[in-house]
Amino acid sequence: MDVISGRQKAGLVIAGLLSLVSVTSAFFPTPDGEEGPPYVVLVLGTILGVVGLVGVVIAWRTGNQAAFRVTAGALVINAIASLPAFFVDVPAGLKLAVAIAIIVTVLGIVLMFSTARRPAAVLD
């Protein structure tokens, strides 16, 4: 069992929250006549959200590096799936939400893979 640092725990919390939001996406499809992501993208988000949540739980409990990688992979694929929002005609609020989600995703991944700070060795 590997010990995880406080920064890694913060990254896992962010990843867990992002994954939790993604899990619910397929249950709230875009209403007819409105612009939004296709249902296939919402289902993909739900599947990736479940994978991310499982990875977060395993990483938190065991410190397993493979679980960190799986969680990060789910977050990255989910972020890539949301990128087309910048290239189609959707409301500005949706574009802003996607931009914020991508920034928070990057922050969470950086924190998950950060290591504990150790004092530098001083040579005399």
Image (tube, rainbow, N blue to C red):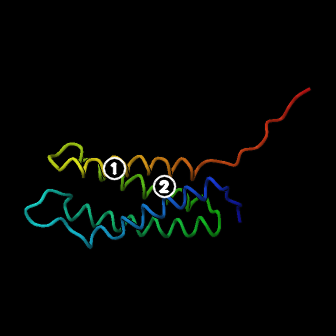
Q: Residue at x 37, y 65 (%)?
A: 21
How far apart in space, not on screen, are marks 2 and 1 (Cα)? 12 Å
Mark 2 or mark 1, earlier in chain: 2
Q: Which quadrant of the figure has residue 68?
A: bottom right
Q: Residue at x 47, y 68 (%)?
A: 53
Is 48 in front, or is 37?
37
Q: Residue at x 56, y 50 (%)?
A: 111
Secondary structure beneath disc 1? helix
Q: Position of residue 58 (x, y in %)?
A: 57, 69
67 relative to 18 in the view: left or right: right
Q: Residues within 10 Å of mark 1 (few under 14, many from 20)?
A: few
Q: Is residue 6 left or right of residue 96?
A: right
Residue type of the residue flagged with mark 2? Ala
Provide the residue designation for mark 2. 72
Residue 10 location in percent, x, y? 57, 57
Please tell me whether mark 2 sits on a helix, a strand or a loop: helix
Image x and y of residue 17, in percent: 45, 63
Position of the C terminus by quadrant: top right
Up the image or down, 124 lies above or below 89; here it is: above
Residue type at tag 1: Ile
Identify the mark at residue 80; answer none if there is no mark.
1
Report x, y in % for residue 41: 25, 60
111 to 12, vertically: above or below? above
